[in-house]
């Protein structure tokens, strides 16, 4: 993984150019809708569960999917060309955790993604975990400036801090 299940020998890839590969009226999908299920056991560090938010990011799943963590439904996405992120924090437990992903070949979003392309289904881009600490920089803008002789410069820093809990945050300049 990542891989399209058609590349693993399940179902057939479909090439489309002008016509839609499904014969129905938008936004409906065919009753015969091939579905693939993925399952993974994993552990996360205790510090991730204790400090901040743990997200899972799917960089590409075609065409739609449901996500479960430890048997609890987490969410749904159907935009296969954009990342989908979910907060796993409330669902994680110490030790072993289990993710289940149910991917459907056709969704209402399939009508928006018709181009000169191969139609294949599954998780086709990376999947990764991201831990966001309780206090974190969420936006930083750096604006450099040089004098007329290009010898001396300044750097203006504008930063936004995001905190999930009230508390002090300190900035420090060095050098």
Image (cartoon, helix red, strand yellow):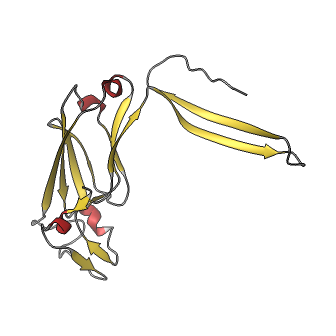
Q: Is residue 119 visible?
A: yes
Residue 154 found in image quarter: top right
Q: What percent of the width, then of the height, locates residue 152? A: 84, 41
Query: Is residue 88 left or right of 24 when viewed as pictured?
Result: right
Residue at the image point whose x is 20% and y is 27% from the top: 95
Image quarter hosting the N terminus: bottom left
**Does residue 116 lie above or below 67 as drawn?**
below
**Does residue 141 lie above or below 132 as drawn?**
below
Image quarter hosting the C terminus: top right
Residue at the image point whose x is 90% and y is 48% from the top: 149
Q: What percent of the width, then of the height, locates residue 144? A: 74, 44
Q: What percent of the width, then of the height, locates residue 125? A: 32, 57
Q: Residue pushed farthest bottom?
A: 18
Query: Is residue 12 left or right of 145 when viewed as pictured?
Result: left
Query: Is residue 128 left or right of 72 when viewed as pictured?
Result: right
**Does residue 170 lie above or below 124 as drawn?**
above
Residue 173 found in image quarter: top right
Residue 110 found in image quarter: bottom left
54 or 8, nearer to the observer: 8
Residue at the image point whose x is 29% and y is 35% from the top: 88
Q: What percent of the width, then of the height, locates residue 49? A: 31, 26
Residue at the image point whose x is 34% and y is 75% from the top: 115
Q: Residue pushed farthest top?
A: 167
């Amino acid at each position: 993984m990542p891989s399209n299940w058609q590349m693993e020998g399940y179902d057939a890839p479909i090439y489309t150019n002008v016509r839609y590969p499904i014969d129905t009226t938008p936004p409906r999908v065919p009753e015969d809708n091939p579905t693939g299920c993925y399952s993974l056991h994993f552990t996360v560090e205790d510090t991730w569960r204790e400090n901040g938010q743990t997200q899972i990011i799917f960089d590409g799943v075609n065409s739609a999917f449901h996500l479960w963590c430890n048997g609890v439904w987490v969410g749904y996405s159907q935009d296969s060309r954009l990342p989908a992120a979910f907060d796993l924090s409330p669902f994680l437990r110490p030790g072993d955790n289990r993710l289940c992903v149910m991917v459907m070949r056709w969704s209402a979003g399939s009508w928006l993604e018709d181009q000169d392309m191969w139609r294949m289904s599954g998780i086709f881009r990376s999947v990764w975990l991201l831990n966001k600490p309780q206090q974190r920089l969420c936006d930083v803008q750096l604006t450099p400036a040089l004098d007329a002789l290009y010898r001396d410069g300044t750097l203006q820093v504008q930063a936004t801090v995001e905190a999930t809990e009230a508390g002090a945050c300190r900035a420090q300049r060095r050098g």
